[in-house]
Amino acid sequence: MVWDLIIAGGGPAGATCARRAAQLGLDVLLIEKQNHPRRKACGGGLTPRVGDALDLDFSPVVEREQGGLRLFSPSGLAVTEKRAELTGYLVRREDFDHLLLKKAEEAGATVLEGITVLDVIETSSGVDVVTDDKTYTARLLVGADGVNSTVARRTQLKPRWRDDEICLCIEASVPMDSSDIERIFAIPDSSGRVFIEIYFGALRHGYAWAFPKREEISLGIGVLVSELEDLRGVWKRFVASFEDRYGVRVDLSNTTAARVPLKGPIKNTVTKRVMLVGDAGGFVSPATGEGIYYAIETGRLAAEVSKEILSGAEGMTTQTYQQRWRRAFGKDLDVANFLAGMMFHSIENMEAVCRMAHDDPVMRSHTFEMITGAVTYKESRNRLIKRMLRKHLGTAVKMVL
Ligand SMILES: Cc1cc2nc3c(=O)[nH]c(=O)nc-3n(C[C@H](O)[C@H](O)[C@H](O)COP(=O)(O)OP(=O)(O)OC[C@H]3O[C@@H](n4cnc5c(N)ncnc54)[C@H](O)[C@@H]3O)c2cc1C
């Protein structure tokens, strides 16, 4: 059988692509190497725009709603911002990803789990996808196989990540009594929502986080590999300081290391018959590490372009996918890269950003809205620069020197 579309990988990018393509009437095969539900190292923080991007009800897997943020500067200065409205969702990735995969199947996609894509061979009429089971053939292939993408490697679209493009993380899923979680993270109002926490300064070009779920928290730390220095030591100190701050014992038995691409999308994400989506194409915000939103959006775009190509619509090629993501958020991710460069340039810059947010409610609000994705990075950059020039000129000058 020749499939219309094969998708390698069943994370948020692959599952969304499969669901949308099946809804559009394509014969879709999704090949996933693990068996869901599977553990995925992740904070599980979703910005509200994920809710807008997903046209399905994912409330059954939302563990907590976020209504605020606590930032800690390198020197320990705490900056708190909360809102009356919802500012994000917190999920366990095993549940969230499993739900999306089930929805893809319900829409009509065929899902094979426990099968690994090993190679990709483009022919004049289609693509052969070699797996550890057998070879499957399709007219088009979407590589949604994450940061260590076999599809990106075998097509030569991204043979390897450079050290200055990739972030190494340690993440622990830490069981915790919900009473402790509420004591530490609950917003003191009647909303039932929680703060998330971000810690700057343990490392240059990276940050640590604490994201609460119902009965566990995600504790993590990440840094660009090119800036890597004693990650394990920093991790131990971060965990110890968290324990001291909140009077809890942290069980690290469920700890993993994982990578995230952190310099934005690769330049070319397509060949004649292959499109890369999600982490496989580097679709993660360099400013915050948010990748789930971009995985969902690129998955959807690739499905829609596949449908148009296979229907013979005039002028439609995989290049159309490249043009559409570029138009939708490519430039904005370039701006995110600029903002990350400024922020993570030095420990002094991170301290300065937190200090401005601490002292100035307008800077605090702008920083919060950038992190929670309430406005585009372009809009954030313009607002932040304008405010800094008006109220924090000395700091602005020091940050760029
Ligand atoms: C520690 C950490 C914390 C993070 N926290 C957040 C956060 O809080 N919020 C956020 O928005 N983003 C976060 N991210 C980023 C986010 O996890 C990714 O951007 C997102 O998972 C990308 O989705 P994806 O579908 O492209 O890839 P993935 O979720 O990685 O899914 C890829 C799938 O492909 C499968 N696969 C891999 N190779 C093959 C193969 N050869 N054959 C078949 N299947 C294969 C894998 O098993 C996997 O299921 C975090 C990342 C890390 C590492």
Image (spheres, rainbow, N blue to C red):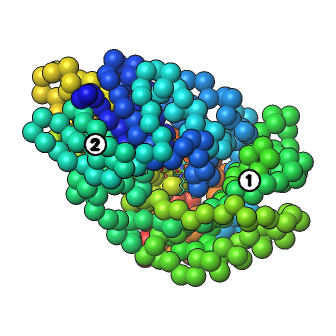
On residue 279, the disc is none
Where on the picture, by quarter, is residue 236? Answer: bottom right
State the image quarter where residue 296 is shown.
top left
Say left or right for 347 vs 138.
right
Q: CA distance from mark 1 to mark 2?
A: 41 Å
Q: Decide: marks 1, 2 in contact (CB < 8 A)?
A: no
Q: Badge 2 is on which residue?
A: 135
**Residue positioned most to the front:** 133
Q: Residue at x 47, y 69 (%)?
A: 224
Q: Which residue is mark 1?
A: 217
At a point 61% along the width and 72% down the height, the residue shown is 201
The C terminus - image quarter: bottom left
Q: Quadrant location of residue 95?
A: top right
At label 2, the amino acid type is Thr
Disc 1 or disc 2, which is closer to the eye? 2
Q: Position of residue 31 (x, y in %)?
A: 40, 40
Specify whether 29 is left or right of 230: left
The x, y position of residue 158, in whole percent, is: 28, 58
- Category of crowding for the residue at label 2, using alpha-carbon neighbours closer than 10 angstroms: few (below 14), some (14–19), many (at least 20): some
Ranked by sequence position, the earlier of labels 1 and 2 is 2
Can you say whether 321 is above or below 359 in the image?
above
Viewer-proximal residue, 17 or 247?
17
For label 1, being within 8 Å of ligand 1 is answered: no
In the rendered image, residue 192, in percent from the top left (x then y), is placed at 81, 36
Q: Amino acid at mark 1?
A: Ile
